[in-house]
Amino acid sequence: MITVKNKIFTITTVGTTYIMRVRDDRYIENLYYGRRLSGDMTDDATICALTEKFNNPYGNSITTPDSEDKVTLDNLCMEFSNAGTGDYRQLPLEMTDATGNISTRFYFKDSLLYEGLYAKREDTGMPYARYYAEDRKPRTLELILEDRRGYEMRLIYTAFDECDVITRRMVLTNNSDTSVSVNKLSSLQLDLPTTDYSMLSFDGRWTSERHMHEKELISGTYSVGSVNGTSSSSHNPFIMLKNSEATEHCGSVYAFNLIYSGNHEESVEVSEYGKVRVLTGINPYGLKISLNPGESFYTPEAMMTYSHEGLGGASAHCHDFVNGHIVPEQFAGRVRPILINNWEATYFDFNKRKLLGLAKDASALGMELFVLDDGWFGHRDDDTSSLGDWYVNERKIGGSLSSLIDKIHSYGMKFGIWIEPEMISHNSDLYRAHPDWAVDVPDMEDYVGRNQYILDYTNPDVCDYIVDTIGRLLADNDIAYVKWDMNRPITDAYSKRHECQSGTFYHEYVLGLYDVMRRLTEAFPDVLFEGCSAGGNRFDLGILSYMPQIWTSDDTDVHERVTIQGGTSYGYPQSTMGAHVSASPNHQTLRSSSIDSRFNVAALGVLGYELDLTRLTPVEKKAIASQVAFYKENRDYLQFGRFIRVKKYRQLTYYQIVSEDKSRAVVMMYRDRSEPNISYDTLYASGLEPDATYRVEARRQKTSIKEFGNLINQISPIAIKEEGITQAIVNSVYALDADEESYVVTGATLMYAGIKLQQRFVGTGLEKGTRVMGDNSAALYVITKEVR
Ligand code: GLA
């Protein structure tokens, strides 16, 4: 709900209130953003209480010429700050007019309130938050600011009531008769009156994405961002501000994100007066936009949310927003298939026999989608060639693509395929035909990543070529799923089409990318697209607007995944996270883990398998068959239930997913390192009905005899030498049953007291009931409401 009354603007969502007022000097003051207020928030008494009082100027400060008070602009919570006015904090706009002047004077002029989304959203060329068929239409407020030289700035707010999200963007229009140069325009400015926050950012690198870091905000500017042309794994555009009293489950938390996949910057400044300013938007690095008379510069849409229920509360808002307003409507709430991907099973070294062998085993184990990864096109047998040549290598796959697909279908599976359509190899027919389509700077040496180069998506001819080529691939073949990869960041941002490209290249590249993604996903609405960028290097709301899931990370190691999926969960729901069971030792870390631990972590996302099933032992295959059956039974809420980061203490991490009606849940308990000879482990849960009765059971799994090494001889009737042939044979057909563990308790008991689990192995014996849970291992506990 949004109301406009006496130049007071109130945005109310289910749990939050946002209030602004226009001052006499025509600046818009932010009066409040936080937990929902009650009553008439626009009456004089409330407004007086919320307005900051400026009776005397601060020493050494600047005020406005027509202030109603002795305001110090440097210390006012504002919706938009001008350059050259004594607000010395980070500014949302850097603009130079034709005379070289960088000062601006945007003042409030008018407002517009309407039902529905921002009217000119399509003109932006960027994705935006939507509402789906059955939803109530959100409302949008535009605050129109004017600089009398002929410039207009619109601050645009849309309220998504039920998930407590407000989106915001700014649009600058040049109505003067000379061009201006724009070097920065944020999407969102939010000024908060107090300092008592820490900032959470989600940072990393390839195979180690979105690790959560918390920094206490003291004084100065803290910023994260990306300048490599993608949203990047270095710093995700999602950030949070957490009040010092807040925890995972209670207290004040703000969260911000950007619906954008290119360079971005999020800055949080603590001013000398102790106020906080948040700016998010396109990264100004290299940006130089010449805005000609009559033109507008649109910023991407940003989102913000507030929760008084801690980090978990803010995450829940973000999850609902992504599931309900970002992913394509036809995939909202639609369960995703369990896939087998051949990449880590074969890498480039495959042929028809290997692919079909893998598919056959996958189908027998209950998997639903076979994904053919890199290496099927051109003459690509390694990463040195063929990107851009999107026609099938029939020699390698032993016939036409459709004949391979038919075979996969005959196993009862759907077929999916990997592409990397933003790339070009020098050794490709495409490059030989169009060397000017590769991004590089003439007369400078080319910088290469993974032997490949970027295609110039700022060039409409390139975009058309990709839409045609990939469109034909999808039209000619029965393909149900596409993995869209992007394996190297941008260097030498420059297009050979124009004289000077660097200032607009990064942004135009993203616009070209969105154009291609929009055309292809609209033409093939039933194809499930999964975003990927060397794993999770481009995990953002822009990609999710076209592709409902993203390959979270190339790293599938249990330990890393607990951190990566946990970090990602602060801003994104589990329905967006591709999560695969891969081989052990893990191909990224060489760390070993049990087949069930790998599943128990992957089950918290969109499940897939990515290992050579044909080489597994009967014991491992049995384990996988039961995992797949378990996932299918619980998939609806595993993918779309509420994800909760329950607890982290000592060496243990607990994540939980609970169904919307709270009748079913799983808790994943992960142990980093095994502490010897310690007392019991407690199982904790959250988000259940306190008075309901629940049955709690450990998901049945096996324990490999290898875990015991030579110790197994204490119970084995035959001598088993560690790493010997007998151990290998026994291990392939036999594993120890983990003991049943089952409890019936109330939700309150589970949530407030926890369940003391069976004693863990402490090195003195393996009696009945002893739990075995070593380093880097995960267990799942299944919680079901008892029907009385
Ligand atoms: C990237 C992806 C992998 C795989 C390879 C293929 O690294 O993240 O999953 O598809 O490319 O080259």
Image (cartoon, rainbow, N blue to C red):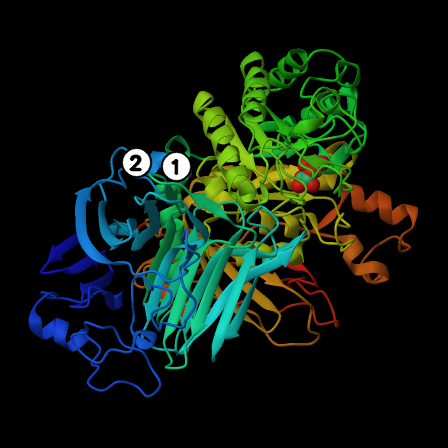
Mark number, residue 332: 1
For numbered disc 1, what is the local secondary structure? loop
Q: Amino acid at mark 2?
A: Tyr
Do the CB atoms of the residues marked 1 and 2 lie less than 8 Å apart? yes
Quadrant of the image occupied by residue 456: top right
Circle 2 residues within 10 Å: few <14, some 14–19, many ≥20: some
**In-front residue for pair 556/318:** 318
The mark that comes first in sequence, 1 or 2, is 2
Tell me if mark 1 has few (under 14), some (14-19) or many (20+) residues whose alpha carbon lies within 10 angstroms of its own. Answer: some
**Label 2: which residue?**
132
List x then y, in percent, for residue 91. 41, 64
Question: Under 8 Å from ligand 1: the CB of mark 2?
Answer: no
Mark 2 element type:
loop
Residue 123 percent across, percent down from the top left: 36, 35
User: Residue 475's quadrant in the figure?
Assistant: top right
- On screen, residue 541 above or below 697: above
Q: Nearer the viewer, residue 190 or 81?
A: 81
Q: Is residue 152 left or right of residue 246?
A: left
Please report the residue visible at 34 percent of the width from the left and 47 percent of the height from the top.
Answer: 171
Tell me which amino acid carries mark 1. Ala
Residue at screen point 62% across, 47% down:
599
Q: Say which quarter of the image contains residue 377.
A: top right
